[in-house]
Image: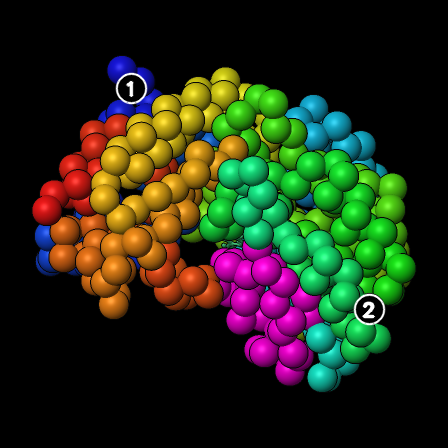
Amino acid sequence: MSKLFDETPSREGTYSFKWQKYQGKDILPAWVADTEFRCAQPILDAIQQRVTHGNLGYVLPSQCLPAIDAVCRWLKEKHDWEINADWLVWTPGVVPAFNAVCKAYCKPGDKVLIQTPNYPPLLAAPKLNGLERVDIATVEQDGRFTLDFEQLEREASDPACTLMILCNPMNPVGSVLNADELSKIGDICKQHNVVLCSDEIHCDLILESQHKHLPAGRDASLSHNSVTLMAASKTFNIAGLGASFAIIPDSRLRQSFNQAAAGIVPWVNQLGLVATEAAFTQCDDWHQQQLAYLKENRDLLVERINNIDGLSVTAAPATFLAWVDASKLNVDDVQKWAEERGVGPSPGKDFGAPDHFRINFGCSRQFLTAILDRLSSK
Ligand SMILES: Cc1ncc(COP(=O)(O)O)c(C=O)c1O
């Protein structure tokens, strides 16, 4: 029993994005990527303290030293990356950040490389910014998903390709890029003058100790050619506070990013800063306990899903999201199949793979068991 994760607060009446979709229906929501867990107590205490102070006016994120120091500490200790505080740019979300990147480094009509399947707002970003998306396939090698590097090399050589937006760890497939893969990406980008924007929002959710997250900007081949996007939001379940950050070591790229965001992308709100600071300084134990709990959830899910006729899933080393192959169900609409059984996953078609769905297992064991029982029913 883990009191921290077995007991989750009811979200009824909170207008939760995840729960609103199936309100009034007997369908367990297993889609949006936030967790059902209560935040770590130090985060709640820090927010409470700021609220008790009573003034919630503007704060200047770029001078908020305690939060900046907390990010620097976290990156050094957890990712072996010593950054200069100047490289840090706060953003009110990773989605606005990768859209600002599209504006900053591309001109209308340029091409943007994106692995598919991928997180829907990431797939949407090029078109939203007047750019053309070039899909790079995901391939399975020895039971692990990775990018089609031959295709990447080929497409990157097109002079119209000026940007690649990567998602590492990958959403939805949950792979973590290894050093060889990252340096290959770095070499390809450098050779063809492609800026790399690496969405690493899931980087603190590595469930297997033999896998290590490698931040793009830490790689020598990428340090002057990359924007690395991170946040405490997924790991510490504070996504509703809208706080994330970009690490941009190159001053020229940083200036273009800030120019593209100016007047459109608002500052991070102060409760998000306070929560990020607490998460990155006082919650190491909670973080480890959550990883252990999620790993057990993942193992349970993999075992049970692979016993359901027509479904299969691989044990991904990262994220609290499971990418389920439902192609062997031989039904027209795999999302409908799940919903008819009382489970609401993320529709695979939104990610670019209509014969899959994605299940969020960032929930109590009891809730996950109910999801799996329903999917197992005939
Ligand atoms: C890969 C990825 N990037 C970004 C986000 C959302 O980022 P934010 O809420 O900070 O805009 C998500 C949320 O699911 C995600 O999975």
- In the rendered image of this protein, does residue 300 appear above or below residue 96? above
Q: Label 1 is placed on what type of residue?
A: Lys
Q: Disc 1 and disc 2: Cα gap in Å?
A: 53 Å
Q: Among all residues in the image, which is located at the extreme top?
A: 1
Mark 2, other Cα within 10 Å: few <14 / some 14–19 / many ≥20? some
The quadrant of the rendering that contains the N terminus is top left
Asked if the residue at label 1 sits under 8 Å from ligand 1, the reply is: no
Residue at 79% across, 77% down: 160
Residue at 42% across, 26% down: 295
Q: Label 2 is placed on what type of residue?
A: Ser
Q: Can the viewer see residue 21 in this picture?
A: no
Q: In the image shown, does 312 or 56 lie closer to the viewer?
A: 312
Mark 1, other Cα within 10 Å: few <14 / some 14–19 / many ≥20? few
Q: Which residue is mark 2?
A: 157
Asked if the residue at label 2 sits under 8 Å from ligand 1, the reply is: no
Q: Give the label, 1 or 2, closer to the camera.
A: 2
Q: Which residue is mark 1?
A: 3
Where disc 2 sits, the SS reads loop
- In the rendered image of this protein, does residue 214 appear above or below residue 150? above
- In the rendered image of this protein, does residue 38 appear above or below residue 32? above
The reply, left or right, for residue 2 in relation to residue 83 is left
- In the rendered image of this protein, does residue 128 appear above or below residue 151? below
Q: In the image shown, does 110 or 336 lie closer to the viewer?
A: 336
**Residue 235 placement (x, y as % from top left):** 49, 37
**Residue 214 placement (x, y as % from top left):** 70, 36
Where disc 1 sits, the SS reads helix
Whether residue 80 is in magenta: the answer is: no
Residue at 89% across, 59% down: 191
The reply, left or right, for residue 131 in relation to residue 342 is right
- Report the magenta residues as a range: 112-138
**Residue 85 placement (x, y as % from top left):** 79, 41
